[in-house]
């Protein structure tokens, strides 16, 4: 049985088109009684039900305005003739938990969010999903269940934060704070200057303002076709820290689009095709997006049952130049991209160069080509936020590379973001865990030419695969960003830059070669060959392997469940 605009929620409410003595209608009497207790009237049982996903928390600026956004979406759904059930989810701030045990829960929260949404949506037999996303893991986390369930729906980004400032410093952001810590540790900055940056860097609500993970994923989701055109780049709030009218309008637009998709019968997997993923990856490379985008796009493809392999990122990256002049590798922030027309400007440039599939369907019922047709043409704009393909910020193949070799037999992710690095060889300085490595940097024990190895921070090892932004930023702040390579089975923040090689697989906890590295071993990274090698003999490696034992497992609760179930970062660190 299926009812127009109410394809599944009749299972909860009963079929309003049936007689009142219909057996199923009678069976659902208790459910309707409870719904009447929350305000349902007779006519409401005829209306479609939407799950409105709201990863709200007052604990972090990325999502602390989501209660207001959620209320706008819910009101618009009601106005258009539907009912909205709000689904709250956990939300973990990467920036606030960085460098602490709390960071273990960040990537874990992505899959937990997806499971929470699946639970609520399926339990109440809702007809479609409107999913708000903000802080890093919430953007992919709220979209994964749409792909998993192949339900009608779409995503809306809560918006980027505006740049901060303080006396002597302009255009500040979360990355500036982290790097200031390293500058203080190196004696470059005093405590008063550090405090000024702390107080002035983040002026209000919104997700981290550069091309960091949240903005990478908002852009990828729009390019994927699962968000309305032009919604990926808008600031969350005004200078007065009030939700902008533009973002309010986005809330109203997504409600209308959700109804339109329900009417048309378009479902998530009609949009999230292999070609759509190729579009998303292309945009990620063109913008200089976060390495986290690789994990999340692999996970989203897995949910959509699209065959996407990690080495395909190299194929797309090899033909996609780096166009953006956005932080952390450039000057500008996401709000500057919004001022010149947002993501459609970038996508038009890429489409006209033959780098995008223009025939992919998107959530507004139009194709990519139709959506960008009237976007401003890059050549008609006077700006330097986005470079033209004819004169890119960096040539193709100079942003993120998937590498492998004797240190990473499956894969690892190397981020160079346009830097003229071809080859790096150095002696390993090894730490089992992030905190000891960070302390060593702050104590000036890491020197130019070192390869800083941080292991047992993978999905199973930590567990949770935390970001290494604290040590990475400390290196940059200490002036070592281009003279020390950081190698880890953990991951990096979108704000990370320097010589960063992460996602090493197999990870140390699983007995990968990174577990066998010792201080003083030579490690070589070759950009042209896309390799990372531990330069020791097979006999030495075999002897070390014979002595290696996995660390004792003392985890409990969610961390223990995650460790048992999580897949390798090579496959997106999915959990089923």
Image (cartoon, rainbow, N blue to C red):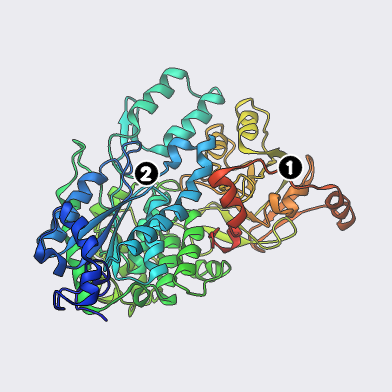
Q: Looking at the image, tell me whether mark 2 or mark 1 is earlier in sequence order.
A: 2
* Quadrant of the image occupied by residue 468: top right
Identify whether 402 is placed above or below 137: below
Q: What secondary structure is found at the residue carrying circle 2?
A: loop
Rounded to the nearest whole Å, what is the CA distance between mark 2 and mark 1?
Answer: 32 Å
Q: How many marks?
A: 2
Residue 278 placement (x, y as % from top left): 44, 72
Residue 564 placement (x, y as % from top left): 62, 54
Identify whether 401 is placed above or below 492: below
Q: Residue at x 14, y 49 (%)?
A: 245
* Quadrant of the image occupied by residue 257: bottom left
Q: Which mark is residue 372?
A: none
Q: Residue at x 59, y 60 (%)?
A: 567
Q: Residue at x 60, y 27 (%)?
A: 442
* Quadrant of the image occupied by residue 408: bottom right
Q: Is residue 372 visible?
A: no
Identify whether 495 is placed above or below 178: below
Q: Nearer the viewer, mark 2 or mark 1?
A: 2
Q: Residue at x 24, y 67 (%)?
A: 28
Quadrant location of the C terminus? bottom right
Which residue is the site of mark 2? 208
Of residue 204 and residue 52, the one placed in the foreground of this image is 52
Quadrant location of the N terminus? bottom left
Which residue is the site of mark 1? 428
Task: Mark 2: give few (<14), some (14-19) or many (20+) Cα within 10 Å.
Answer: many
């Amino acid at each position: 049985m299926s009812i127009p605009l109410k394809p599944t929620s009749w299972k909860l409410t009963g079929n309003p088109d049936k007689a009142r003595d219909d057996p199923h209608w009678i069976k659902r009497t208790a459910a309707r009684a409870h719904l009447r207790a929350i305000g349902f009237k007779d006519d409401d049982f005829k209306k479609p039900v939407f799950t409105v996903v709201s990863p709200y928390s007052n604990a972090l600026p990325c999502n602390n305005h989501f209660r207001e956004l959620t209320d706008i979406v819910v009101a618009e759904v009601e106005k258009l003739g539907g009912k909205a059930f709000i689904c709250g989810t956990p939300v973990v701030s990467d920036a606030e938990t960085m460098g602490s045990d709390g960071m273990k829960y960040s990537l874990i929260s992505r899959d937990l969010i997806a499971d929470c949404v699946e639970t609520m949506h399926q339990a109440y037999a809702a007809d479609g999903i409107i999913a708000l996303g903000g802080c890093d893991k919430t953007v992919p986390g709220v979209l994964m269940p749409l792909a998993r369930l192949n339900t009608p729906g779409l995503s809306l980004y809560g918006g980027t934060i505006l740049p901060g400032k303080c006396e002597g410093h302009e255009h500040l952001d979360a990355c500036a704070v982290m790097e200031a810590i390293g500058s203080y540790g190196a004696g470059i900055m005093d405590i008063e200057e550090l405090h000024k940056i702390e107080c002035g860097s983040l002026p209000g609500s919104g997700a981290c303002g550069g091309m960091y993970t949240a903005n990478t994923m908002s852009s990828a989701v729009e390019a994927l076709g699962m968000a309305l055109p032009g919604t990926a780049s808008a600031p969350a709030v005004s200078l007065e820290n009030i939700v902008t009218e533009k973002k309010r309008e986005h809330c109203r637009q997504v409600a209308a689009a959700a109804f339109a998709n329900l009417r048309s019968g378009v479902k998530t997997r009609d949009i999230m095709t292999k070609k759509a993923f190729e579009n998303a990856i292309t945009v990620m490379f063109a913008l200089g997006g976060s390495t986290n985008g690789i994990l999340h796009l692999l996970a989203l493809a897995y949910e959509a049952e699209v065959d996407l392999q990690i080495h395909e990122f190299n194929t797309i990256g090899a033909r996609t130049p780096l166009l953006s002049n956005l932080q952390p590798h450039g000057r500008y922030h996401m709000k500057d991209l919004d001022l010149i027309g947002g993501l459609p400007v970038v996508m038009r440039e890429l489409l006209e160069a033959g780098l995008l599939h223009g025939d992919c369907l998107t959530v507004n019922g139009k194709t990519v080509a139709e959506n960008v047709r009237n976007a401003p043409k890059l050549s008609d704009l006077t700006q330097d936020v986005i470079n033209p393909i004819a004169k890119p910020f960096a040539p193709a193949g100079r942003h993120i590379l998937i590498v492998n070799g004797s240190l990473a037999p499956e894969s690892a992710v190397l981020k160079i973001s346009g830097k003229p690095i071809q080859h790096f060889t150095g002696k390993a300085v090894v730490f089992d865990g992030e905190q000891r490595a960070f302390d060593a940097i702050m104590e000036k024990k890491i020197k130019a030419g070192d390869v800083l190895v941080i292991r047992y921070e993978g999905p199973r090892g930590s567990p949770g695969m935390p970001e290494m932004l604290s040590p990475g930023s400390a290196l940059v702040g200490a002036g070592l960003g281009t003279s020390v390579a950081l190698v880890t089975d953990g991951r990096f923040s979108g704000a990370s830059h320097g010589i960063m090689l992460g996602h090493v697989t197999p990870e140390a906890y699983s007995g990968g070669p990174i577990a066998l590295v010792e201080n003083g071993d030579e490690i070589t990274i070759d950009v042209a060959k896309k390799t990372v090698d531990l330069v020791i003999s097979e006999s030495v490696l075999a002897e070390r392997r014979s002595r290696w034992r996995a660390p004792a497992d003392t985890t409990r609760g969610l961390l223990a469940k995650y460790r048992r179930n999580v897949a390798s970062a090579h496959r997106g660190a999915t959990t089923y």
